[in-house]
């Protein structure tokens, strides 16, 4: 039977990635890991991330969302386009992006899909986590990644290993966080740190010296309540600068 969509309608993955609040939290976690990843120099090579770190990170989220809501054939085309873009960067630098760096991004999006949804909505069942795992590992397989874990339980162990092996504090980390603060402003930057403190793995939080604060917990609880009473869109201008509003509107327009 020919598959019409890359992710079936009614899938928990579509529910997760159609939610604006969850996407914002996925973005926050990704911002921390991009800054710590040992392969972040590849993003600096193109010059895009220091000039527009928020846009670059949201584009990663956009690509994932574009695959999740696409027909199967369109999703494959998007993945092929990603591979082509990466191939062009490799040719320009005359080096290969490490395979583990691709897995890091894949695992990061998988992990924060689970954690962000559970933070602002509800706990996921084991079957739902396996479904999320299957979708992202299929993406990885189509990207040409080898030796991916066989199931969610194995992935949890490998994810932990990647966190301790591939995340380091560097000059790139400090520069990116300076850029985050510059582009977000003080209030939004503090919100970012608060979400990261609650969301990122312990090793990443230790490297970044992120600390849980009562005020952060209160802000996250307030945001969860705003989503519950359907007024979270009113907070968009507070959470991200205006030029990124269209990204979030597009996210909210996706079919659930």
Image (cartoon, rainbow, N blue to C red):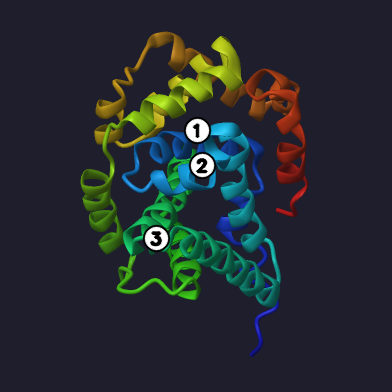
The spot of residue 26 in percent (x, y) is: 51, 40
Q: Is residue 247 left or right of residue 7?
A: right
Give the mark toward the camera: 3 or 1: 3
Give the mark toward the camera: 2 or 1: 1
Q: Is residue 152 left or right of residue 30?
A: left
Quadrant housing the N terminus: bottom right
Q: Which residue is mark 3?
A: 97
Structural distance between the alpha carbons of marks 3 and 2: 30 Å
CB under 8 Å between discs 3 and 2: no
The spot of residue 213 in percent (x, y) is: 37, 12
Q: Secondary structure at mark 3?
A: loop
Tell me where residue 148 sits by quadrant: bottom left
Q: Which residue is mark 2?
A: 117
Q: Secondary structure at mark 2?
A: helix
Residue 122 visible in this rendered orientation of the protein: no
Structural distance between the alpha carbons of marks 3 and 1: 24 Å
Above/below status of 125 relative to 240: below
Between 150 and 247, the one nearer to me in the picture: 247
Tell me where residue 202 sits by quadrant: top left
Between 27 and 231, the one nearer to me in the picture: 27
Q: Which residue is mark 1?
A: 28
Specify few, some or many for label 2: CA neighbours under 10 Å numbering under 14, 14-19, or 20 or more. Answer: many
CB under 8 Å between discs 2 and 1: no
Between 118 and 183, the one nearer to me in the picture: 183
Q: What residue is at 60 percent from the left and 22 percent from the top?
A: 183
Residue 42 visible in this rendered orientation of the protein: yes
Tell me where residue 102 sits by quadrant: bottom left
Give the mark toward the camera: 3 or 2: 3
């Amino acid at each position: 039977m020919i598959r019409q969509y890359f992710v079936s309608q009614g899938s928990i993955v579509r529910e997760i990635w159609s939610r604006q609040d969850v996407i914002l939290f996925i973005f926050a976690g990704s911002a921390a890991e991009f800054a710590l990843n040992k392969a972040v120099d590849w993003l600096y090579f193109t010059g895009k991330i220091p000039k527009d770190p928020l846009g670059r990170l949201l584009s990663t989220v956009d690509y994932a969302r574009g695959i999740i809501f696409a027909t199967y054939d369109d999703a494959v085309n998007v993945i092929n386009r990603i591979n082509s873009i990466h191939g062009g960067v490799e040719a320009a630098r005359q080096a290969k992006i490490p395979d583990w760096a691709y897995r890091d991004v894949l695992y990061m999006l998988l992990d924060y899909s689970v954690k962000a949804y559970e933070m602002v909505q509800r706990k996921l069942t084991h079957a739902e986590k396996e479904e999320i795992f299957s979708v992202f590992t299929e993406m990885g397989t189509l990207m040409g990644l080898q030796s991916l874990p066989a199931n969610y339980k194995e992935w949890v162990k490998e994810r932990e290993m990647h966190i301790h092996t591939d995340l380091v504090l560097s000059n790139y980390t400090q520069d990116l966080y300076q850029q985050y603060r510059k582009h977000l402003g003080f209030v939004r930057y503090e919100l970012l740190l608060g979400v990261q403190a609650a969301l990122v793995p312990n090793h990443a939080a230790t490297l970044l010296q992120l600390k849980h604060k009562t005020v952060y917990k209160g802000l996250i609880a307030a945001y969860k309540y705003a989503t519950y009473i359907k007024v979270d869109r009113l907070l968009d201008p507070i959470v991200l600068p205006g030029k990124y509003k269209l990204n979030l509107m597009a996210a909210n327009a996706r079919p659930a």
